[in-house]
Every structure is written in structure tokens, then in C-alpha cells.
């Protein structure tokens, strides 16, 4: 895919403006993103209570703390907000001005995603550091696992953005794209490494979680950082993550094209 | 030189769901949805040459905006051919979008909480406008639109009129060759409407850009366009000079006489109809061909202080056109 130089420069300028815009809403942003910090604490509290002084499937309290503290950052970086940002734009006819510029409006969604995360991350990091000091997670990371983690994290964020955009694009056809999104969120809750680390899921469900894309938007980078995977699992994980990213890119492109055809047929 | 805009037999039909109000109709529509075909544009053809300013006239729902949306590439037509600057608009190629602009009175492309200057910089980057050209264009637009310090205030603090000026400027930064203006003066006060009109005229003179505009306000069209295209119910009713519209749709003249003293009206031979008699002022309407004779007769048979022969006002002509009547 060839991206025009003006498109990249445009996306950059757009991101800069979006960051400036986001700062206008810093208090709201802080409250939104605070939720992302708080809800993993709930899972941590439950698993901590079950593990007690012992362990669950080899995971001790400090391991759960490491998992869910990493989860906080990963879930924030990979959060898909397009259903809230891009979907309403389509529904309310705000897409038209963007369609008149020589840049795909999906870049607008991307710019908003990046600006939201960069601004709210600034607010979240101090909270996160405080929690690390209090909860004393057992981080046994290596230089290699950090590098692989960053790769997995970037792909997870991209994959999640493409999935979020695909669901947001359903707004071209239905005013109820939220319902579809809820299903995806439900599956991510169960199979993405949210309610429990994937390794604790029962055999059949674990296989399902390994095959489906949800884990690759959330749980997989955490497992990589915390060295929970053997080399075979690691290779399979990256292969599947790449495959899902590729598939998502194809899907979002097809849905965008069909959506634009629909939009320009029924009235922009 | 080929025309900048060429439209042949443009058709745009929509299918819209339809149901009556109320709970029962609501239940019924779940089982069986009714649809209705809307013929927004129903086979219109026209051409616009480089540098022309053309007014698109029509009542609400005539298909003006739909036509402009097709021309700017937002809508895919049901049928027909459109060529603007050698491009098919709905392909929405970057080269095409860089040469046109569509400015809608009620749409907004500016960041609400940021000064417009920030939105301008985004457009500069997206359209790949080079620094020198950008500075020159902003200077020109600032002068023509009297933008002053509007660019450095957050957009939300601008008045409607100020925002419209800034929107216009934002849509023109990339120096488009063809301007589609959809109701550019809607909701603005008279002074601001005047200002926008002067701007469009000056911009057209300065840059030689082709302008196609729609408006409800007759004054806009009178001031800006020598040529008008009248559409109603998706069909083209008239395409030609503004004066010709009056000639064609108003085959009558209004003759007003002021008398020196009260007197009886002469026999008008059925060639004219008396519209009003108010004191010493008499207004009659005569067919265009009969007007000279009627005027002559009035002049010779009445003690006349003053006499004027006028075309009916444009608003009235247009109104008649839309009602499908002839004056």
C-alpha cells in the first residue's frame, strides 16, 4: 500500500491538533481512563482472594499483581474507542467534510485514537507507579521479553484499532452498531485474558482463546512480557497475531469500501 | 477549452423507509417495511465554463444540494455522466479533491475548541500546500474576508457569521479551481450576507475560479450570478441568463401611472388588467407585446404626471415558476 506523503504529513498534523483538542477535556479523560485502572484491580482482588497464600495453576498473588498491573497499561494502549469516536461521525453525517479531503477519514479515527491515548497516558502513569509501589508485583522480565512485548503491544494496538474501526463502520448500515460491539467486548472479557489469564482457562476454552483474535488484542502481550510462554507457544502466538492483523486489515478495507458505496448511494 | 463542469442526464434516486406515526404503524413497520422512491435529481444536463458563476435556484427539496453533492463526489449518481475538470467526481481521487471545494452553510470542518489557525494547519498538511503558497493564500483570504484576529480565537467563541467566514477560508486554502457553495449565507444577517457576496465576487475575479452556488436568497443570486439554473422536483426548468428568466417566465409588464388629477380610466381594449387603483396611482398589467400600445394609450388619454414600465420582481417570477404558473 502506498501512502501519499501529504497523507502522512496530514495524519501527523491531525494528531497534533487532536492532542491539543484532547487537552481541553483532560478532566473527563482522566475520569474515563481511571476506569481502565480501576477495573483490573477488581479481577486482581478476586484472584488474590482465591490464591490466598498459595497459588492457582502456578500463579501466586504477586504473579496476578504483575499480570493485572501490566493489563492496566496494555488495555489502555490497545483500547478501541472508534465505536465512540468514528461511529457517531458516520451516523451524524459528519463524515462528509472529511470525505472532501484527499485523505481517508480512517486517519481521523487513528489520530483521535493516538491523541486520546497519549494524553490520558500522561495522567495514568503516576497512578500506575503508585499502584506498583503498593502491590509489589513479581516482575521477572528480561531484555528479550521487553522487546518482544513492545512488538506484540504495537501489533495488538493496531489489530484492536482495525477491529474497533470495523465495528464503527457498521454505522453505515445500522444505528445499532453498539450491540455488535458489545458481543465483541463480551468475548474479549472471557477469551482475551481479561477475567482470567488465558493459561488458567479450561482446555477447550483455552484452545478457542488461542485461535480467536481477542487474546491478540490484550492478553498475548502481557503473557509475552511476563515470560509465561515457551518458545513454541511464543512463535505460534506471533504467527496468529500477524495473521489476524492481516485479516483485519483486509476486512476493514472491504467494509470501508462497501460502507462508502452505501453512504454515497443513500445520501451523505 | 472544455467546460469545467459537464453534467449529462444526471439522475439520483433514493429509497427511503416510510411509515405513519403512532404505535400501530410502528409495529407494522417491524413486519413489513414500506419504502418510497425519492427522485432527488431526475435527469438534468448542463455545462459550466471556466470562471463562470452560476446560481442554482430551487425550493427546498428541489435537488440542489443533492446535485452539488454528486458534483463534489460525496454521492454516487443513479445514472448519468458527470465530468468536472476531467475527473469523475465520485472516484474521489486526491488530484480531484485538491482542485475543488464544497462549502456547506451548516457543516463544520473546524476543531470546535481550537483556534481556526490549527484547523488551517491540518488542511495545509493534508492538501500538501507549500509554505509560500500557504502564507500568500492566508494573507489574501484574511484581506478579502476581513479575518483580522478571528484565526487565533477558539472557534466556539466565534459568532455564526465569523465562523462562516473562517469556514469559507478553510475550504479555500488549497486554491480550488471549482467552488461548490451550498447556501453560503444561510442564517447570516444582511450585512454579513453582503460581505460573503462581495467576497465571492472578488475571489472569482482574483482567481478566475468557477463557482456554482445554491441559495434561498434571491439577493445572493442577483448579486453573484448572471446565469441561473432553476430546478424543481429534480428537473431542470430553466438554464440561462437571469434577465432571460424574467423574459421567459414573466411575459407581462407592470405599468404604473401617477395622475395629475382624478379621472376615469380609458378603455384598455382588453389588453391590460387593472391591478390596483390607489388615489392617483394606477397599476395595470399588460402582455409584453401589448405593453407599448397600452402605454401609448395611457399617455395620450390620461393626465399623467409620471409613468413607469417594469418587469415583475424576480422573487415573484421565481415563485410563479415553482408554482408551475405563468404570470
Image (spheres, coloured by chain):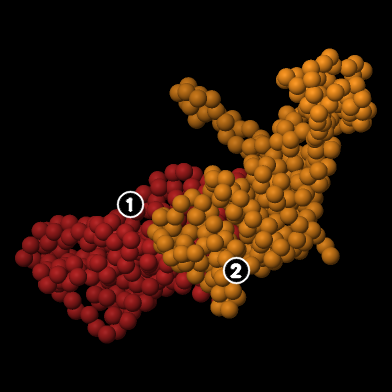
Side of A175 relative to B66 (left or right): left
Residue placed furthest toward the left: A53
Q: Which residue is mark 1?
A: A186
Residue sitting nearer the eye, A185 or A86: A86
Residue A253 falls in image quadrant: bottom right
Query: Subunit of mark 2?
Result: B
Q: Which residue is mark 2?
A: B140
Residue drawn where x is 83% and y is 62% of the image: B2
Q: Position of residue A188 (x, y in %)?
A: 33, 57
Side of B234 relative to B239 (left or right): left
Q: Confirm whether residue B85 shows in the render.
A: yes
Residue sitting nearer the eye, B15 or A249: B15
Q: Are marks 2 and 1 on the same chain?
A: no
Q: Position of residue A106 (x, y in %)?
A: 50, 62
Q: Nearer the viewer, mark 2 or mark 1?
A: 2
Q: Position of residue B213 (x, y in %)?
A: 67, 50
- Which chain identifier belongs to the orange chain? B
| Distance between the alpha carbons at the discs numbered 2 and 1 | 55 Å
Eyeballing the image, is B46 above or below A123? above
Side of B143 relative to B266 (left or right): left
Q: What colour has chain A? A: red
Amino acid at each position: 500500500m502506498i501512502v501519499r506523503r501529504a497523507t502522512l504529513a496530514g495524519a501527523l498534523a491531525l494528531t497534533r491538533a487532536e492532542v491539543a483538542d484532547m487537552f481541553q477535556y483532560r478532566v473527563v479523560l482522566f475520569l474515563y481512563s481511571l476506569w481502565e485502572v480501576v477495573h483490573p484491580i477488581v479481577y486482581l482482588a478476586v484472584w488474590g482472594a482465591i490464591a490466598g497464600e498459595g497459588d492457582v495453576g502456578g500463579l501466586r498473588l504477586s504473579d496476578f499483581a504483575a499480570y493485572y498491573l501490566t493489563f492496566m497499561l496494555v488495555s489502555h494502549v490497545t483500547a478501541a474507542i472508534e465505536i465512540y469516536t468514528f461511529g457517531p461521525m458516520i451516523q451524524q453525517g459528519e463524515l462528509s467534510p472529511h470525505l472532501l479531503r484527499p485523505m481517508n477519514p480512517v486517519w481521523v479515527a487513528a489520530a483521535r485514537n493516538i491523541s486520546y491515548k497519549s494524553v490520558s497516558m500522561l495522567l495514568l502513569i503516576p497512578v500506575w507507579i503508585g499502584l506498583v509501589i503498593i502491590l509489589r508485583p513479581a516482575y521477572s522480565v528480561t531484555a528479550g521479553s521487553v522487546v518482544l512485548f513492545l512488538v506484540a503491544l504495537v501489533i495488538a494496538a493496531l489489530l484492536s484499532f482495525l477491529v474497533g474501526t470495523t465495528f464503527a463502520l457498521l454505522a453505515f448500515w445500522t444505528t445499532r452498531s453498539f450491540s455488535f460491539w458489545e458481543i465483541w467486548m463480551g468475548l474479549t472479557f472471557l477469551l482475551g485474558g481479561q477475567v482470567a489469564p488465558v493459561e488458567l482457562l479450561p482446555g477447550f476454552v483455552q484452545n478457542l482463546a488461542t485461535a480467536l483474535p481477542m487474546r491478540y488484542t490484550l492478553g498475548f502481550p502481557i503473557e509475552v512480557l511476563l515470560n509465561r510462554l515457551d518458545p513454541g507457544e511464543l512463535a505460534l502466538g506471533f504467527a496468529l497475531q500477524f495473521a489476524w492483523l492481516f485479516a483485519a486489515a483486509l476486512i476493514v478495507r472491504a467494509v470501508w469500501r462497501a460502507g462508502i458505496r452505501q453512504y454515497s448511494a443513500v445520501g451523505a | 477549452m472544455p467546460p469545467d463542469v459537464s453534467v449529462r442526464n444526471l439522475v439520483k434516486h433514493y429509497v427511503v423507509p416510510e411509515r405513519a406515526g403512532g404505535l400501530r404503524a410502528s409495529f407494522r413497520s417491524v413486519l413489513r417495511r414500506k419504502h418510497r422512491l425519492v427522485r432527488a435529481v431526475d435527469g438534468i444536463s448542463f455545462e459550466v465554463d471556466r470562471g463562470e458563476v452560476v446560481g442554482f435556484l430551487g425550493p427546498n427539496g428541489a435537488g440542489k444540494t443533492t446535485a452539488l453533492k454528486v458534483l463534489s463526489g460525496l454521492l454516487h449518481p443513479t445514472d448519468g455522466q458527470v465530468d468536472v475538470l476531467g475527473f469523475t467526481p465520485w472516484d474521489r481521487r486526491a488530484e480531484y479533491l485538491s482542485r475543488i471545494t464544497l462549502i456547506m452553510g451548516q457543516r463544520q470542518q473546524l476543531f470546535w475548541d481550537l483556534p481556526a489557525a490549527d484547523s488551517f494547519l491540518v488542511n495545509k498538511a493534508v492538501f500538501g500546500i507549500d509554505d509560500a503558497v500557504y502564507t500568500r493564500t492566508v494573507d489574501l483570504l484574511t484581506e478579502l474576508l476581513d479575518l483580522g484576529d478571528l484565526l487565533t480565537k477558539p472557534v466556539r467563541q466565534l459568532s455564526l457569521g465569523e465562523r462562516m467566514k473562517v469556514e469559507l477560508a478553510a475550504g479555500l486554502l488549497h486554491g480550488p479551481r471549482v467552488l461548490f457553495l451550498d447556501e453560503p449565507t444561510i442564517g447570516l444577517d444582511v450585512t454579513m450576507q453582503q460581505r460573503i457576496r462581495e467576497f465571492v465576487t472578488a475571489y472569482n475575479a482574483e482567481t478566475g475560479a468557477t463557482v456554482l452556488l445554491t441559495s434561498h436568497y434571491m439577493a445572493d443570486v442577483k448579486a453573484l450570478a448572471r446565469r441561473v439554473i432553476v430546478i424543481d422536483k429534480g428537473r431542470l426548468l430553466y438554464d440561462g441568463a437571469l434577465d432571460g428568466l424574467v423574459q421567459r417566465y414573466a411575459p407581462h409588464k407592470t405599468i404604473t401611472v401617477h395622475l395629475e388629477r382624478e379621472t376615469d380610466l380609458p378603455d384598455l381594449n382588453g389588453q391590460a388588467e387593472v391591478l390596483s387603483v390607489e388615489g392617483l396611482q394606477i397599476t395595470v398589467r399588460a402582455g409584453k407585446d401589448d405593453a407599448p400600445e397600452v402605454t401609448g394609450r395611457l399617455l395620450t388619454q390620461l393626465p399623467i404626471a409620471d409613468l413607469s414600465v417594469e418587469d415583475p420582481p424576480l422573487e415573484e417570477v421565481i415563485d410563479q415558476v415553482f408554482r408551475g404558473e405563468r404570470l
